[in-house]
Every structure is written in C-alpha cells, then in structure tokens.
Amino acid sequence: MDPAQESNSGTHANNVQGALQQLDLLVEKAEHYAQVKLIGSGTKDLSSPSRIKQEQPISSPTSHSFGDHRHRRTEKEEDEELLTETKHSSSGIQRFEASPWYVKGGEMRDYQIRGLNWMIQLHHNNINGILADEMGLGKTLQTISLLGYIKHCRHKHGPHMVIVPKSTLSNWMNEFARWVPSLRTVSLIGNQDERNQKIQEEILKKEWDVIVTSYEMCIKEKSVLKKFHYIYLIIDEAHRIKNEKSKLSEIVRDFRSQNRLLITGTPLQNNLHELWALLNFLMPDLFSSSEMFDDMFKTDNDHEESLVQRLHAVLKPFLLRRIKADVEKRLPPKKECKIYIGLSKMQRDLYTKILMKDIDVVNSVGNKVDRLRLLNILMQLRKCCNHPYLFDGLEPGPPFTTDHHLVDNCGKLMLLDKLLPKLKQQGSRVLLFCQMTRMMDILEDYCLWRGHEYFRLDGSTPHEERQISIDEYNRPGSTKFLFMLSTRAGGLGINLATADVVIIYDSDWNPQVDLQAMDRAHRIGQTKTVRVFRLITEHTVEERIIMRAEMKLKLDNLVIQQGRLVEQKSNQLQKGDVLDMIRHGANYIFRSKDSDFKDEDIDIILARGEQKTAEMNEKLAQLGESNLRSLKFDTADENGAPTSAYIFEGEDYREKQSRTSLLDGWIEPPKRERKANYAVDAYFREALRVSEPKAPKPPRPPKQPNVQDFQFFPPRLFELLDKEIYAFRKSINYKVPRNPDVGPDGERDRLEEQARIDEAEPLTEEELAEKEELLTQGFTNWSKRDFQQFIKANEKHGRDDLEAISVDVEGKTPDEVKRYARVFWTRCNELQDVDKHMAQRGEAKIQRRAAVKRALDLKMARYRAPFHQLRIQYGTNKGKNYVEEEDRFLICMLHKLGFDRDNVYDDLRLAVRLAPQFRFDWFLRSRTAMELQRRCSTLITLIEREICDLEDRTKQRSGAGANNLSLTPANSGPSNTSTVSNQKRKSTSAGGIGSDSTAEMSGNSKKKKVTA
C-alpha cells in the first residue's frame, strides 16, 4: 500500500474513533446530569459539564486490591450524601392526587394530573422538558395548571411567556380564563398601532402573570419581549424550532428564562440534527455546538444505530408522551372509512388529455425525466380528481351559473350530494378538510346552492374572524351544519369537538397532517363516535397517494416504537414513486370514455368503502418493515408461504414482466378517431404513408459567425460570408439536389445555384482581414431581447420620444439607444417585414390613440352633464345586449379615467361594480375587462363617425373649422333631437334620456336570460 494512502486511512480511523469518544463523553455527562437532577443535586452546581468530570471520585490504584469495592466512600462523603437526601425529601415538593383547587373550570382527568405532577417534578429539579402527549389529550390544560401551581403553591407571580400559533392564540386566552382565571394574562397580537397601545398600557406596567403571543409577534416585538426575565418560556407546536438557523429559533434562544417547556403533539425528530436542535434548546450547556454534534455523527453507518438509541435514552427523562388509546378510556373511538369514487365523463376526458400531453414522460424509461415536470403532472392530475372547474375555461359560461352541472361534472361532489343530506338527517355536524382554497370556493358555491349553513377557515381568514366562527360553531344550539377548513391552516390547535363527522376531501402527502385534522373533532369533550370519511378517486393517482401515506405512517410508528429516528430520506418523494403514481390506472382511464360514477344508494357506497378499508388495513397489518420501506405489498399467506400482489392464478407476473422489460411501464394511448378525408391525393399519401418531399438543407462551413439582420452589419460582410459558403460547398463537391415536383423555373434556379458553387473561389487573405474588420462594425452587443424591447418601446412611445425608449430598453444607455435608432430608421428596410411593420404599426397606434382621444374630448364637450345627457347615434349598429344607459356610463367613465392609461379597462370594470345605479344589473356587472374593451371600441367607432359627419356638415354650412363644435354645448332639449332622429331603438322612449322613467324602461327592456 502507498504510504500516503496508509497515512490517510489511519487518520480517518483516528478521527472516527475520536468522534465516538467525544460522543460517549457527551452522552455520559447528559445521563449523569439527568440522574443527579432527578435524584437530588444538593449544593453541587452541575450546570457545567467540566464540573461533573472534576467531581468524580479518584481512587488510588495502590490503595486496594483488584476487584475490592469496599470503602468506595469515606465517612464524610457518606454523611454528606445522607444529609442531601434528607434535605431533598423534606424540601416540600407537592404532588396532586385530585384536581388542584385553583383549577376552576372543571375537574382534571387522572392522566392530566399525572402529567402535572411530572412537570412539577421537572420544575422542582430545574429541568426543562417536552410535553408530547397525542393531540386532543389536554396539553393546554396541563400547561396552564403548571403555571397556576407556580403562582399559588410556589408564590411566584411570573412572568411567563407562551408562544403559540396565530390560529390558536384566542383559544389559549379562553382556556386561561376558563381553567385558571386567577392568572392575569395579556395577549400581544394585532397591527402596529394596537400592539404599541397594548405595550404601553399593559405590558410595560408588568401587571400580568402570563403573556401569550404568536411566532410572528416574537420576531416583530423581540426588543420589547427581551426586557423581561421569564420563569417559564413555553413554545406550543415545538417543531417550529427544529431548524436552529431559522429566525424564530435564534430569537427564542435569546430570551432569558429559568425554565423552558416544549409542547408538541406530533412525532418528534426526523433526523439527528433536528434532535440536536431540541436538545440544544432544552440543555444548551450540554449541547452547545451543532458543528461538534454533526462531526460526531460523521461516522460509519454501523455505529449510528447504537448512538441514536443512546441519545433517545438521554431524551427519555425529559419527555412525556401518552396516546389516547392508553389513557383516555372514556373517549369514544374514531372510525375511518375510505370511500372510492369514479370519475365523471368530463374528469375522465380531462385526465386522459393530461396524460396524453405528457405521454413521453409517462412511458419514459430510466432517470432521464425531470422530477419537477413529474410533480407538475401529478399536481394537474390531483386537480382533475378534485374538480375539473379548477382548470380555467372548463366551466360553462358566461353567464356562470350554480346549477346541477357543478355536481354532475365531479365524482366527489356527486358523492357529497348524497352523503351530506344523510348526515344532516342523522343530526351529525361535519368538518370538511380540503387542500386547495380554490376548491373551497367551489364547495362554497355548492353549499349556497344546496342551502347548507357553513363556516369557512383558511390561511387568509383574519384572526378575529377565525375565533368568532369557531365560537359560533361550538355554541350550543348552533345551526351551522358544516365547517370548511383548509388542511394546513385548520389542522393545528383548533377545538371543534361539537362535530362528529370529518370528511377529508383530498388527502395530504404527510399522513400526520390528516391525523391532526381528524383530531380537531376526536379530542376530549367528544361524546359521539367520530366518523372519518376519506374521499378517494378510483384508478387515479389518489389511490397511490393514499397507499403511500398509509405505509409511511405505519413505518414511522414501527421505527418510533423501537426508539429509532425516522429517516429523512423516507419523507422525500422520489422520481420513481411519482412516475408510478402517474402511471397507476392510466390504462383503465384510456380504455373507457364514459363516467365511472355509479348512481347507487349512499348506504351501498358506504358499505363498500368500509369493506375496502378493512381489506387495506388487513394488508398493512401483515407488512414488515422491509416491505414498508420498499412500498411493496408482498406478504405471506395463511400457511406462511411467501406470496405477492404480483402472483395471480398461480403465475408470478414479476417474471413475466422481466421477460418483457422493454415494455416495462408502457401505457398504450387511446385510439385516435380519424376524420373523413375526401382529398384523393392526400388519402393515398396517408394510406401509403408517403411523406411530403423535403429538400435536404445544404451544408454550411463549421465556424460561421452568428450575424443577425437587426445588428446592421455592413452589406459587404454578407457578400463575403456568401462567398465563403459557396467555396466550402465546392470543396466538398456538394450538388444541389433536383426536386421532381418543381417546374421549369425551379430547375433553372437550381442550375444557377449550382453554377455559383462551381465558380466559387475561397477568400483571399485581404478578404479574410476585411471580414474580420467588418464583424466589428455592427451592433454586436445588441441581442434579440434588446431589439424586441426597442421595437416595443417604439410601438408604445413613437420614434421621437427617445428618452422614454431608453428607459424601456434595459441595459442600454441613452446614447447607445440614440445611435441605434439613427441606424435603425435608415436601414429598417433591410429587416424582415414583421419587425419593420411592427415599428410602423406602433406609430400608427399612437396616431390612432390621439385621434380617439380627440373624438372623445369633442363628444364630451358638447354636453354640460354628459353622464346624464350624452347620446349615441347607433344607426343600424344597436346591439341587443347593452342599453343606452350602460353605454353612456361606459363612454363617460372611460373618458374620465383616461383612454390611454394602462389597465384602464380593469379600472372601468371596477367602476361599473361600484356604481350604485348598476347594483342590480347582473349583466353589466359580470362583464370582463376584455368584453368591456370590445364594447367601448364599438362605441368609439360610432362616436368617431358621428364627429366626422358633424364636421362635414358644419364645413358645408358655415365653412368654419370643426373646433367651433366643441364650443357649443348641447342640451337635452329639442335642439338635439335631430342628431338622434335616425336611432331605431326598441328599448327606450323618445323622451328625456336622463329621466328616471327612461332609465327604468331601459333597465326593464334587456332581453338577457341568466337564470339557471
């Protein structure tokens, strides 16, 4: 072996051994720390790990024989230990056997009292801890009772700080007032002015025991919160600080406190570094350096298992976790039923189109497919399963109506339309969880159509409105049947135990998120059996998503029960998993074109769902850890023989699949429907698979410079480049191919092209030098993007406004733009027609804009009150959809807003919706900005024609200019009737246009049917 390699391997072994020794020392100190703290520390200060090491007794190797353990302590040492134990036993630590007297809102349960005693013991020994009871077991009450103990039994009035999610802050304040009203609480939440007022009037006066705030407020008001030295710093949903580099983690570590308590209802650490983050927050003296901690774990995988188990042993004294099945015997069980639903016809067609659009990805082999593209396909398929109207343009309209089509085009809504009335009849109340807020918009329309009273809560719901909705829903006698929540925003810390049915409309990738959603109803206070209905679209990606989530949840439970950490890699969705989900059911979808949804009785659907759920649970129960990690359903039969989901009728289809590996995963697209083709030549060309003749591209020299016409090189350069190309083709004996389909003119052109090649000569040295010189004379630093910006700026501002053009062309100075503009307008005829016409068309647009503005100005100047008096000469162009009152408002408001403003039609649409006279005009209020623009363009054309006719008549009568026209206002009296005498109107009278009677007749004359 090379000495250098031998030295490197020896160094690596030494580093690994050193890291293991360091970790052993750290674990030993932590174990000793916990043991001494729990037994009793006496007068020794064990906050420093070095102090622990120094105080270990040192025995002389010569004092006693080997194996003699007598006289391990001196008499003085033993007396000190007995005295310490005596002091510890008489120190007055209190344990509760029943609910404490200061808890006023009711009686605490026995396991909650045990949790309180556990936290009291931690507090007495000055140890920080983690309360990790399962969701719904009353962690909030246990925490509040601990703070009440400190006030009433230890006679310490705080201050304490509780940091909670924004969505649960009001619930925490209510729980404080309900259970321990003697604790003076203050909440720090609201906008800047509200917070400043509360800080000055309440917080800085220190007339409080507990301050409750959110994560965001901690960051914004850290300077105020740092002024206090807290007895307890409590963080709810502690996984928010698992990343020690996040802003929140850094700030909470800076707060001064005697004790720290973490509250979490979800399984803890996902990897070793997150474990360190929690340990660092709880015991910063022992776990101070993340770099050192990470270095310790840069060891071989063989050692990791034992190290992780030892770290869990360290964490165990500071962690309390109970689950509902073990402690809450009175809580009714939770029953989950997976309901499998078919696709509607519209969903099936859309699902097929999504797969066909990316059929190359679906049928791809290997790892060549981009993972982001796969995830995008998966997201589109999930949207299709939820509702086809999540795709723009698929909902019929305008006018957009809420009707049966909303239900008939979606399998899940067809099921809900059967399920919700049954639940309502049974007296149940429902929580409906959904991932997508746009899907919640559709569900809102459905609830309004069917008359279901509901509340809605998502990430955009204001904090005050959240709590009002929750309180009203939980109020005895509430008539609200349904509570719609987004899974992420409504799944944490919200108590909705008055509901007994949970519907998961679409499942989350992380099964823990769905469990949190279910626990909003399945928690303490629930008196009914909670039924959970999970909606799954059959033969689609949703089946695979559910399967993966269930297996992931079971795998996590197996690992956590064995005291190991959940692997981070198992949480990541690999490309193979995504591709497998996309392919799942694709062949089934392609084979059928009709709806899959069966119009059956809801009881039959539910019974079939319960049967399928039981079958899946039975399969999951038989799976071992290796199967779960590979996400395979391979199990053993009743005789113990290995079996597999791939074995069917005695044949192992995995072997058959390996024999046809080239067709692995192949999804056969649906057959295309051919349209009748009556062109005889095209028919035979298609039947014989004869393609159109395509002439091959002639070769070019390998190193030709890339010159563009918009860079305006000298014309001589292109002559030299052409000469170089012809000389190259001559050198390779290139012959221009003959095309049999062209006539005599084409053959003549071919001979001329071949003659130029045969007569070509290579460039001389002088010409080569000239070519290099000419290549420097164009605008080489102008890219296609710069050129397009220049063209659009000319189109927008006109060729003369060079200052504005310079602003729009990014990365170019005004001098560069001016120099380019001079050459451009001199040589623009050399450009392609599209570019040249674009610039010229832009100037024409500017002139057109000026003409329209002048016509509108002249039209408005003819009336003192144009919003009431303006009339439009329709001629024969009067449409049936708009009445004159609407047209008058559109033209007047367009002139007022500014015709040439950007986004003026969006502002016009907003003005229509805010106008009180149109508050019941559904047709006009529902017009889009594009539709309003089209209508205004028609009206502007009529106005321009009217102005032109008036100018011609005025010139003929008096010879005066058209400018006098704008100086003569028009009244709504008889003098103006001649200008509208040719109007053929059916919907308004010939009387005063601005009168109320005419407006009323105009409103009633519309022939628009918008009802469902």
Image (cartoon, rainbow, N blue to C red):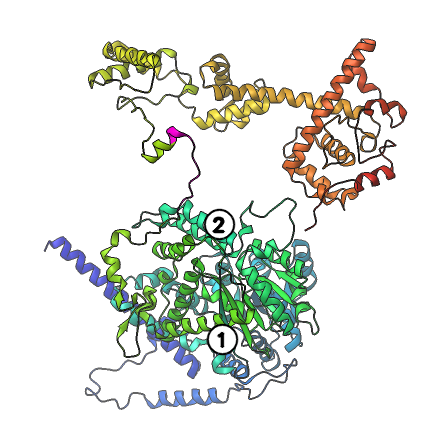
Q: Which quarter of the figure is the N terminus placed in?
A: bottom left
Q: Is residue 1001 above or below residue 758?
A: below
Which mark is first along the chain, 2 or 1? Answer: 1
Q: Which residues are magenta?
A: 671-682
Could you tell me residue 626's position as x and y percent?
Answer: 30, 69
Say which amino acid is labelled 1: Asp
Between marks 1 and 2, how big is the CA–CA gap? 45 Å
**Front residue of 234 and 91:** 234
Q: With 91 as the anchor, is 882 left or right in this view?
A: right
Q: Disc 2 residue type?
A: Leu
**Element type where label 2 sits in the image:** helix
Report if residue 511 is visible in the image: yes
Q: Which mark is residue 133?
A: 1
What is the chief secondary structure element of the magenta stretch?
Answer: loop
Q: Residues within 10 Å of mark 1 (few under 14, many from 20)?
A: many
Rendered view: 42 above or below 977: below
Q: x, y percentage for residue 976? A: 86, 24
State the residue lying farthest toward the left: 1
Please check the rendered image and state whether residue 297 is part of the magenta-colored stretch, yes or no: no
Residue with the mark numbered 2: 350
Mark count: 2
Q: Nearer the viewer, residue 944 or 514?
A: 944
User: At 69% across and 25% down in the image, what residue appears?
Assistant: 941
In the image, which is nearer the foreground, mark 1 or mark 2?
Answer: 2
Query: Residue at horizontal 77%, vertical 33%?
Result: 888
Instruction: Tell whether 833 sits left or right of 573.
Output: right
Disc 2 crowd rating (10 Å Cα; few below 14, some 14-19, many 20+) is some
Is residue 674 in the magenta section?
Answer: yes
At x 44% / y 15%, what residue is drawn? 830
